[in-house]
Amino acid sequence: MPTTLTAAIAQAHERLLPRVTALLKQVERSAARQPRAPVPAATRAVARTLFAEARKILGREAGLIAGSAAADLSALSVGLGQLAAGLEAFEAEHSGWSRTQGAVAWRLENGAERPVSRLRSAAARPGGTSLPKTEADRDYGHMGKTRSQAIKTLFRRMNEREAEAYTQGYHDAMAGRDRTLPEPLE
């Protein structure tokens, strides 16, 4: 494992981790149905590529995981899970909170920092919007109301429905109509 992190290694990590987790989900679904089934050739080729790329980041550890992950779907699932955990541990070891970036950032060589893209908030991403200052200022749905206004509207509507049902029941009782539930359809 490299002691200093370069921008190229950080970028390779950011490209690799989503691909590993996507393949892991796919293999887990297949392994849940047929754990002892052989690994399809296309899946094996993709997995080999991912393990080879991970070796550039994790070193020998990725190679050792790859060697035990080729037997069947369940073994590949375990291997990909270990690879994803290794990549996340690598990220945790080489990143931390950056006050200047306002996000979790890679600690690169020469003291440079670069935000971890998968952990950046939507507001910090290009094209993102700024976050509201308080939770009460957030927009709730198509109503364009704040949370407190939306809750008041919901409470008012619930009370209106309850009052309407009560009134309907009263009128039915006065008219002598039975308010039993209708018979179920067969």
Image: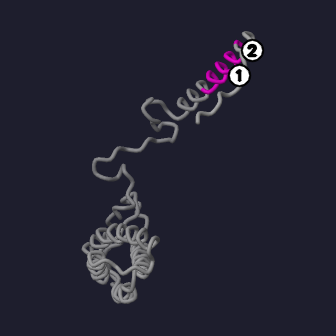
Q: Which mark is residue 173?
A: 2
Using the image as rendered, state which of residue 4 and residue 9 is in the foreground: 9
Q: Which residue is tagged 1? A: 179
Please tell me whether residue 92 belongs to the stretch shown in magenta.
no
Where in the figure is residue 147, as x and y percent of width and height?
A: 52, 35
Where in the figure is residue 71, as x and y percent of width and height?
A: 39, 86
- Residues rendered magenta in the picture: 158-171
Q: Callout 1: helix, strand or loop?
A: loop
Q: Does the CB distance between marks 1 and 2 fall below 8 Å?
A: yes
Q: In what quadrant of the picture does the N terminus appear?
A: bottom left
CA neighbours of label 1 inside 10 A, class few (<14), some (14 to 19), many (20+): few
Instruction: Check the image and report above or below for 136 versus 80.
Output: above
Residue under the point 47% across and 30% down: 145
Residue under the point 35% across and 82% down: 58
Residue under the point 32% across and 47% down: 128
Whole-angstrom CA distance, mark 1 to mark 2, is 8 Å
Callout 2 amino acid: Ala
User: Residue furthest toward the front?
Assistant: 186
Drawn side of residue 155 relative to residue 75, left or right: right
Q: In what quadrant of the picture does the C terminus appear?
A: top right
Is residue 1 in view? Answer: no
Tag count: 2
Please tell me whether residue 164 belongs to the stretch shown in magenta.
yes
Callout 1 amino acid: Arg
